[in-house]
Image (cartoon, rainbow, N blue to C red):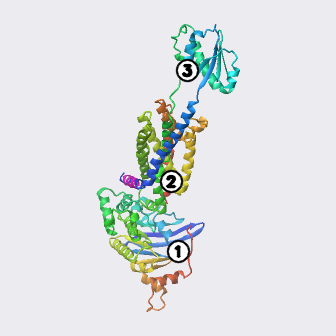
Amino acid sequence: MDTVVRIDGLIKKYDNKAVVDGLTLDIQEGEIFGLLGPNGAGKSTTMNMICSLLKPNAGKIELFGYDIKKDSRKVKPLIGYVPQDLAIYGNLKAWENVELFTALYGIKGEALKDEIDRALEFTGLSDKKNAFAKTFSGGMKRRLNIACALGHHPKLLIFDEPTVGIDPQSRNFILERIKDINKEGSTVIYTSHYMEEVEALCSRVAIMDNGKVIAVGTPDELKDLVRRDPSEDISLEQVFLTLTGKKLRDYTEG
Amino acid sequence: MSRLFILTKNYLKLITRSKMMLIIIVLGTIMVIAALSSSFKTLLSSAGKDETFDIGYYMSEDSRFVPLEKSITDSLASQGIRAEQYDTEDPDDLIKKGDVEVFIIFEKDSYRIIGDKQKQIDLRIVQFILYNVDRMQGGVASDESVNIKNGTLESYKMPEADEYYSIVQMVYFLSLGSVVLTQIYMTERKHNISMRFKTSSASGVQIYLGKYLSSVIVSWSLQVFLMTGLVTLLFDVHLGKPVESIGILMLASLAFCALGMLFFTIFGNVAVSIALMFVILWFCGLLGGTFETYMYSSYPEKLKELSPIYYVNRSLVELITMGESDYLLPTVAVMVLVMAISIPAGILITSRKREV
């Protein structure tokens, strides 16, 4: 398998405090890679740097063999970013939102129409394509948020907590769709605070704390790290709490 | 081109779906024009009733001006000056009591103009008329058929209150044309939509132009064409030379949309951008004649020429009153200058903000 994401010695500082502190990580093609960590661990900062939204103070990120700093024009069409915020226009219809964000990647004409239909179909919004996004429920908005990142067929999809604040049905739908996206050949990076989601979805997981990866492996490998008795039934949440501690993590950005 | 077209098209949809903003822009302009032109029209007409300029004169029997007496009084009357003959050579009492503003004593070979020092302009006007009459004394100035055309003061039509306020308020609201983008900038900030632009392969130029073109299209449609039509229909105001006037308005719209967008691109905060834009354009309007009492400017010309709004106001008002304006070229130059600064700066800042 080819390495899709290669992060080497990545550092990001705010006011001289390292939020990401010498992070080194590889993500392979075809993986659904989970990035876990308590609030302030540095996972969102890491994702933002992978998406070219933030500039690292030091270190290097390569996507598909391209340096994101030097080859950003080549890298950007390969990435689809689903932000935690509902980054959609309420006063545009569902298809208009998808059209606008898909067209940003240079897709036009009939191909654009096809991609709009495909993205809306994929996210179960075909019958609501002419409805304004502001009239959507939370779950529908989350799905539209995903549809807006799919139109250009990205090879790497980055989901930042895509299931926050939605009902179990919508959550289940989104998780199933992410699996389908992965089956179609896209590599996925996924963050969430819902451990059961990560356990069910991800082939490999990295747990971050204080800007560093403190453990990385398959869910089973991570469980083995903290399991004292081989017969002990242990959840990913227990692994997470054992590795990162139970102390509350209140933090402010920057 | 496709990216730019779809961006512009969807921004246009967002702008036109924000109905309240469009209503405020159109109705606001109409209401301000109606209120100002109506109040100043009333004010002017009531003040105009008492505005007479009376002068007195004494004509010596042996004065060489006797044959020209009727021509002189007619000439003065054509300038709104009522001339009355008196039998006194001592006008001090008449002037003190306010019966006359100026008194002329025609002596045998000359005349004296007497009046209050505070009314230098009135005195000069009378002197100018008499000078022209005097110049024609030799040869033609021998009977009543004398035409003292050369004594007529050159003056242009003053703009009516309707015309003046229609122009200056149209221009002022035009200068605020970029506010139609407020809703878009607010939504993008609130929902962090800019991150989608940053992660996309669209360039800063395309992202900037998408917003710019949509605001210009709305401004041209509503503030130039619709407003010109409404002003013609409701206030019976016709632009002096329609092609030139609409050309100036369209150019001003291009410049002011670019200037307004510069505030949005510099400051991420929409409220701060709007507040600063309003303050700066308010001062430009103040110097440019937007808020001044009808036709009475109290600012030095040099100061007024710092305001881009002044050039647009002046050229449009002159086109109405004179049918031509020496300010056309300076207006074009100033608007092009505003664009030449604002558009590259806006594109540069937009591009910088999306770079890592």
Please name the residue shown 60% across and 10% down the image: B66
The three-letter amino acid code for the residue at tag 2 is Thr
- Circle 1 marks a residue in which chain? A
Vertical arrangement, residue B233 with respect to residue B347, above or below: above
Q: Quadrant of residue B63?
A: top right
Question: What's the distance in space between the residues labelled 2 and 1, CA to CA?
Answer: 31 Å
Vertical arrangement, residue A177 with respect to residue B184, above or below: below
Q: Which label's residue is closer to the chain start, 2 or 3?
A: 3
Q: Position of residue A21 (x, y in %)?
A: 54, 71
Residue neighbourhood size for the residue with mark 1, other residues' Cα within 10 Å, grouped as few (<14), some (14–19), many (≥20): some
Please name the residue shown 55% across and 39% down the image: B289
Pointers 2 and 1 within a single chain = no
Residue neighbourhood size for the residue with mark 3, other residues' Cα within 10 Å, grouped as few (<14), some (14–19), many (≥20): some
Comparing labels 2 and 3, the label whose residue is closer to the camera: 3
- Can the viewer see residue B197? yes
Q: Position of residue B251 (x, y in %)?
A: 45, 41
Vertical arrangement, residue A112 with respect to residue B112, above or below: below
Give SS at disc 1.
loop
Disc 3 marks which residue?
A: B77
- Circle 2 marks a residue in which chain? B
The stretch drawn in magenta includes residue B12:
yes
Pointers 3 and 1 within a single chain = no
Question: What's the distance in space between the residues labelled 2 and 3, CA to CA?
Answer: 60 Å
Q: Position of residue B236 (x, y in %)?
A: 43, 37
Disc 1 marks which residue?
A: A39
Q: Name the foreground residue: B99 vs A202.
A: B99
The three-letter amino acid code for the residue at tag 1 is Asn
Disc 2 marks which residue?
A: B265
Q: Is residue B112 left or right of residue A28?
A: right
